[in-house]
Image (spheres, helix red, strand yellow):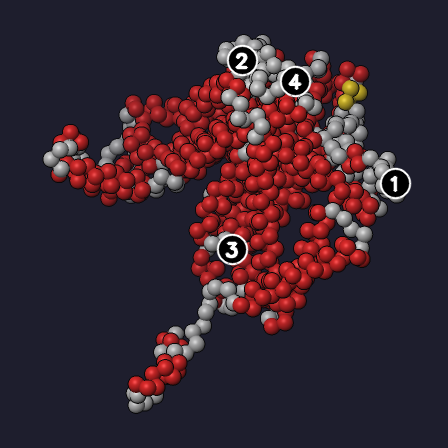
Amino acid sequence: MSTDSPRLLSVVRDPADLRFRLAAHAGGVTVLAIMSLVGLFLAFRAAQAIGVAKFSFFTEQAWEPDAGKFGIAAVLVGTILIALVAIFFAVPLALGTALYITEYAPIRVRGFLIGLVDLMAAIPSVVYGLWGFFFLQGQITPVSKWISQYFGWIPLFRVDGTDLKDPLASPTVYTSSTFIAGIVVALMITPIITSIMREVFLQAPLGEREGALALGSTKWGMIRSVVLPFGRGGIIGGTMLGLGRALGETIAVYMIISPIFVIQPHILQAGASSVSSLIALRYGEATPFGTSALMAAGLTLFLMTLCINFAASAVVARSRSGASS
Amino acid sequence: MTDLLEAPTQPETELPSRESRRDERARPEVRRTIGVRISDVLAMAGAAVASLSVTIVLFSWIAPLTGGIAFVVVGYVLFLGFYALLVAIDESAAVVRDRLIAAVVHSLAFLVIATLVFVVVFSFVRGAKAIPHLNFFTQDMALTGPLDPLTQGGVLHAVAGSLIQITIALIITIPLGLTTALFLGEIPGPFSRFVRTIVEAMTALPSIVAGLFIYASVILFLGVDKSGFAASLAISVMMLPIMIRSADVVLRLVPATLKEASLGLGAGQWQTVWRVVIPTSRSGLITAIILATARGIGETSPVLLTSGFTAGLNLDPLHGPMLSLPLAIFEFVKSPEPTMIARGFGTAIVLMLLVLVLFVIARLIGGETVARRESRRDFLLRIRAAAARLPVSARLRPRSTRPSKDTTRDLS
C-alpha cells in the first residue's frame, strides 16, 4: 500500500440523519410515482379506444365514439389555433410589460407593479372567462367584422355564411370564435409570461448595462445589446410555458366557444374546439368506451404539454441567465 | 467633472454693488442628465394633439370608419408617426428609435395593467348587486330557483366546499411537497435531478388532465364516489408541482456557508436541516404554500370532473358531490337569468377576495427578511426595556433578557 493513496472515508450517520434521508427519499419517490401514474393511468384507460381507432384517431374529425367514428384532428387543430392566437397577443404584451417594469418604471413603483402582475397570475381562470363572455364578446365583434371585411382574402380570416354588404346581417357569426377565446387566454397567460421575463431581465449584469450606457448608447440601445440577449432564454422559456398553459386551459375556453367537430381554420368565425373543452363537455354522458376515448384525448394533450415544458426548461437551463427562476 | 462645476477663476476686485452679475458668471450651466426636458414634453403633447385632431377629421369627414377600438388604434398609430417626426427635427435616428420604443413599451405596459385591473373591476361592478344581501353568505341554493330574487339563496355551500377541499389538499401536499423539496435540495444526485426535471415539467400540467387522472384512477378504478375528497385529490395533483418548484427555489437560496458552519460545528444533516435550513427559508416556504393554495382554490375543471354540481350544502367530503367556488361561478353563469348571473359575479368577488387575502399574507410573510425580523425583535425589546424602567409596569418586564440576541444577529 503506497503512502499517497487517499485515505478511505467512511460516513457514519446517526439515526436521526438516516430517518431524515429515508423520509426525504420516500417523498421524492412518492411524488415521482404520482406523476408517472398520471401518464400510466391515462395510457391504460386510453388503450381500448386507441386500439379500436388505430391511426384514424389522429385523422378523424368527428367525435362519435359509440359509432366507432372518433378522432382528435379537429379538436387538436382547434387547441393549437387558440394557443397560437393567445401567444400572438400575449408575447408582445408581456415583453413590453416586463421591459417597462425592469427598465422604465420608477423604482418606487416597481415593487408594486411586480406584486400586481403576480397577483393577476393568481386570479382564477374562470374570472377571465366571465370577462370574456360578458364584456369582450360584444366589444370585439366589430373588430372581427372589420378584419374579415378587409383581410378576408386570407383564408385564416375568412368568415362564411354572412353577407358583408347587408348591414342588418346578424353579428352572431363572429361570436364564440377561436379569436375571442384566444384573446381571453392571452390575458390569462400574459401575467405568467411577464413574471418569468421580468425575473430574467432583472438579472442582466449591471456592469454590462453601465458599459453600454457609458459607450454612448441610448436606453433602447442598451436594452437591445445587453438586456434582450441576456434574457433570451427567459423570453423563449416564458413563451413556451405560456404556450403550455394556453394549450391546457379549460374553463375560460369552454365558456366562450361553441364547440364544433370539424377542422375550423377560420379563426374569426363562430365555432371552435379544444381538447380540454371536449373533455369537459362530454365526460358526463360518456359510455365506458366513450370515457376511454376521452382519456385518449387527454393523454394526447398531456404528452403535448409535457414535450413543450421539457423544451422550455431545456432552453431556459442552457441560456446564460440559467435556470435560477 | 470638477472643471465643469467650478467657476473659471479670474482675478477680480470684489465690489458689493456688482454681486448679482458676478453670481451669474460664477455659476456655469450645469448639465442635467436626468429629468425631462421641455422639448420632450412639447414633442409628446404636440404629437398627442396632432394625432387626436387628425383622427377626428379622418373619422368624421374622410374615411368610413366607426367604433371606439378603431378610433383608439388609428389615433395611436398616428401619434407614433407624429412623435417620431417631431423628435426627428432635432435628434439623431438612434434617439428617435429610442423614444419610439420607450413610447411603445409604456403604452404596452399601461394596456396590460389597465386591462387586468379592468377584468377585476368588471366582476366587482357586475357582482355588486348580489354582495350586499347577507343571505348570500349564510344560505345555500337548495331551496332557491333561478327566478327567485337575490334576497334568497347564497353561496355558503360553495364557500364551505372550497374550504374543505383546499384543507384536505393542503394536508396532503404540505408534508409531501416540503419533504420532496428538501429531498431535491439536500440530497443531490442523479435521482433527485431526475425528480426535479419531472416536477418542473409537471408545473404546467393541464388542470383537466389532473381531474381526468383522478377520475380514471380513484373514481373508475378504485370505485370511490364522486366526492369532495376526490376533488381534493385532483387539486393536490395540481398543487404539488407548483409547491415543490417554488419551495425548491427558496431552499437553494439558503447560503452554503450557513450549512457548512452548522456541519462544521458537529451538527448532523437532520439537525442542519431542522435548525438552519428550515428557519432561514421559513418565510419563503410559507409563500410557496400560499401561492400553490391560491392556484388550487381557483381551479374549476378538476372539481367539475371529480365532484360535480350540487345546489345544497354538503359538509361530508367522502360522500356525494361537493361544490367549490369556481365551479359555482361556472354553473351560475350558465343560466340566462340576470339574477343567477349576478350571483355568479358575486361568487367571483368572494373567490377573488379569498385569493387576494392569501396573496397579501404571502407578500407579508415573503417580504419578511431575517434582518427585518431582527429589527422588529430589537424594537420590541427596546419597548420592553423602556417599559421596565417605568415603575408601574413591572408585570411587562421580560422574563428572560435573551443573552443570545447578539449572536443570532451575527449569524444572519
Task: Give the residue at mark 4.
Answer: B146
Q: Secondary structure at mark 1?
A: loop
Q: CA distance from mark 2 to mark 1?
A: 52 Å
**In the image, residue A233 lies at what x, y percent?**
55, 47
Q: Nearer the viewer, mark 1 or mark 3?
A: 1
Q: CA distance from mark 4 to mark 3?
A: 50 Å
Task: Give the residue at mark 3.
Answer: A104
- Residues indicated by labels 2 and 1 sit on the same polypeptide chain: no
**In the image, residue A188 lies at what x, y percent?**
60, 37
Chain of residue at mark 2: B
Chain of residue at mark 4: B
**Sequence order check: which comes first, mark 4 or mark 2?**
4
* Identity of the residue drawn at 85% across and 41% down: A167
- Residues indicated by labels 4 and 1 sit on the same polypeptide chain: no
Q: Is residue A109 above or below residue A167?
A: below
From this viewpoint, which residue is outermost toward the left? B391
Q: Nearer the viewer, mark 4 or mark 2?
A: 4
Q: Counting other residues with Cα less than 10 Å from the Cα at mark 1, is it few (<14), some (14-19), or many (20 or more)?
A: few
Q: Quadrant of the N terminus of chain A?
A: top left
**In the image, residue A238 lies at what x, y percent?**
57, 43
- The amino acid at mark 1 is Asp
* Identity of the residue drawn at 72% across and 37% down: A138
